[in-house]
Amino acid sequence: MNQPITVVIKPTRDCNLRCKYCSVGDPQSSYMTKETAKCAIEKISTRVPDVATKFIWHGGEPLLPGIEFYQEVVKIEKPLIAEGYKIQNTIQTNGTLINPSWANFFKENNFGVGLSIDGPKEVNNRTRVFEGDIGAFDSIERGSKILAEYGVKHGYLAVISKHNVQSIDEIIDFMKENKKTYKLVGVSPIGRAKEALEDLMMEDGNFSNSQLRLFDRWLNEGDEGQKSALWKYMVPLLIGKPIECLFYKDCQQSFIGIDSNGDVYPCGRFCGGGEFLYGNITQGSFNEIWNHPLRKKLTERPMNLPKECKKCDYGEICNGGCPMQGYLTGDINNKDYNCKEYKKIFSTIEKKILDIVRK
């Protein structure tokens, strides 16, 4: 509890899009009340003096509760910040609801903004769509332009699936043309995606090939956006420890998830799954939630990983990968189902870096 914490907080799991790979979308989801938001912000940000709290407002589509909800969030946070508590806000949105009012709010209140977009129009609209399979690209791009007009810096996040993995160069070109920092994440077999696995999940080697293609492009072009997308692989190889939650040895020391009704989970990806429910933020103290037996069990995962993880050359920087992606193979202590992909990425990048150094 005595280190910075990132809270993935979902004011709703509802969404105005119907992306084919959605890991969350829940049209029946409730909207977080201001009272629940107040409990979450106050209990977590004041848990320990002088330790930062970062709230990532996620979803679903986090703009659906409306700008008034976030104006209330800022009202709750301001007196805490005045007392010396360190609070940061970031929002991950599909961008389709952004207008000048939202952009001005983000600018005035120092919100970090991430937009979910899967590349150029033809590529994005294969999977990131409204009801009726209507592509969302134009609406996302409009939102991005409004943010730019108001001076709101924002990065992009693209989901890589069977639908677009062979279009990786088009995606990289798009990101480069738009001069954005960005992340590329692989599709997960949860939520709506679980109903279309054959259509969405990539064949062995395709995801790692897409990341290695990005690495080769960066070696040749030196683009800052490309580097930002590769940082989670390159930096651990250089410093010997992970820098992103995907590979943290114990993500539970620095991450937690809160659902729209106040239920608390290991992170946002677990929200809605009763097996790893830690409690509700509106009931009891945060200390009670932090010391919940289920959370304690999850912190022991590094000790319970398979022997092959402990013998792996990249075990210290991978740590079995994401607990959720281990859980999806049957047990939270299993290695991430993308193990082979990560190992290929790490080993290939390491070899190429060493070859460059030797030259």
Image: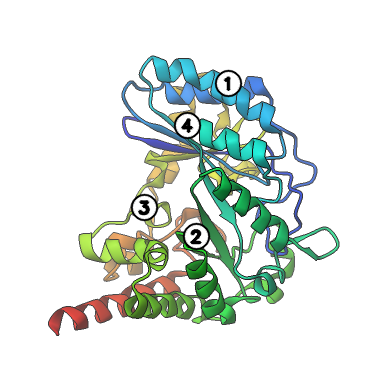
Q: Is residue 99 above or below residue 140?
A: above
Foreground mark, 1 or 2? 1
- What residue did someone put label 2 on? 326
* Numbered disc 1: secondary structure: helix
Q: Disc 1 vs disc 2: Cβ atoms closer than 8 Å? A: no
| Residue type, numbered disc 2 | Gly
Residue 292: give its label: 4
Q: Is residue 111 above or below residue 17?
A: above
| Residue type, numbered disc 3 | Tyr
Distance from label 1 to label 2 (Cα)? 33 Å
Distance from label 4 to label 2 (Cα)? 21 Å
- Viewer-proximal residue, 180 or 315? 180
Local crowd at mark 3 within 10 Å, few (<14), some, or many (≥20)? Answer: many
* Numbered disc 3: secondary structure: loop
Answer with mark 4 or mark 3, whichever residue precedes in sequence: 3
Residue 318: give its label: none
Q: Is residue 256 above or below residue 351?
A: above
Residue 248: give its label: 3
For image coordinates 64% across by 38% down, the residue present is 102
Q: Residue furthest right?
A: 132
Answer with mark 4 or mark 2, whichever residue precedes in sequence: 4
Foreground mark, 4 or 3? 3
- What residue did someone put label 1 on? 38
Local crowd at mark 2 within 10 Å, few (<14), some, or many (≥20)? Answer: many
For image coordinates 33% across by 54% down, the residue present is 243
